[in-house]
Image (cartoon, rainbow, N blue to C red):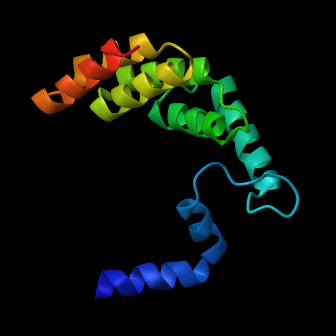
């Protein structure tokens, strides 16, 4: 019951944002949209300063990834590269999987499936991925 109340309270404070989460696709940008373009520009400037100072730690990499994902047309090859760097820093299998997805979005589906196959531990997942790879 407490969890439900918190979710409902959260929905009451941010109904437009929560509604956007339920829709598929990207919400519109620009004046009148739910995106605060000025705040996004400010955060991008902060990220640029961090990078100029040589920042390559996990938080800077995550921020760079978030900026690219927020773009109207994400730069998938750049995202794959950043996910690769983040994977080396964090040694996270989730980040590795995100990198595989970015590789696929960049147009190299075969490489994405090959990488995903290296990450799976379940026989069912492996069979599914192998079947999808064979269909390419």
Query: Where does the C terminus fall, quadrant-wise?
Result: top left
Residue shown at 66% from the left, 49% from the top: 26
Numbered label tally: 0
Query: Where does the N terminus fall, quadrant-wise?
Result: bottom left
Q: Is residue 31 left or right of residue 127?
A: right
- Rendering quarter of residue 84: top left
Q: Position of residue 3 (x, y in %)?
A: 32, 80
Against 17, residue 13 (above or below) is: below
Residue, far right: 31
- Rendering quarter of residue 17: bottom right
Near-viewer residue (76 or 88):
76
Residue shown at 79% from the left, 61% from the top: 33
Q: Position of residue 21 (x, y in %)?
A: 55, 61
Residue shown at 79% from the left, 45% from the top: 41
Near-viewer residue (90 or 133):
133
Against 80, residue 66 (above or below) is: below
> Is residue 122 visible from the viewing direction of this image?
no
Q: Is residue 22 left or right of residue 92?
A: right
Q: Position of residue 86 (x, y in %)?
A: 43, 26
Q: Is residue 83 left or right of residue 76?
A: left
Against 5, residue 35 (above or below) is: above
């Amino acid at each position: 019951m407490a969890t439900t109340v918190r979710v409902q309270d959260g929905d009451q404070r941010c109904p437009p944002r929560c509604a956007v989460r339920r829709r598929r696709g990207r919400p519109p940008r620009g004046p009148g949209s739910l995106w605060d373009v000025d705040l996004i520009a400010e955060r991008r400037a902060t990220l640029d300063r961090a990078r100029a100072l040589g920042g390559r730690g996990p938080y800077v990499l995550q921020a760079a990834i978030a900026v690219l994902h927020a773009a109207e047309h994400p730069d998938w090859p750049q995202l794959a590269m950043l996910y690769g760097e983040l994977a080396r820093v964090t040694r996270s299998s989730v980040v590795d999987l995100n990198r595989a997805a970015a590789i696929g979005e960049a147009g190299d589906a075969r490489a994405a499936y090959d990488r995903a196959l290296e990450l799976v531990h379940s026989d069912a997942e492996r069979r599914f991925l192998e079947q999808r790879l064979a269909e390419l």
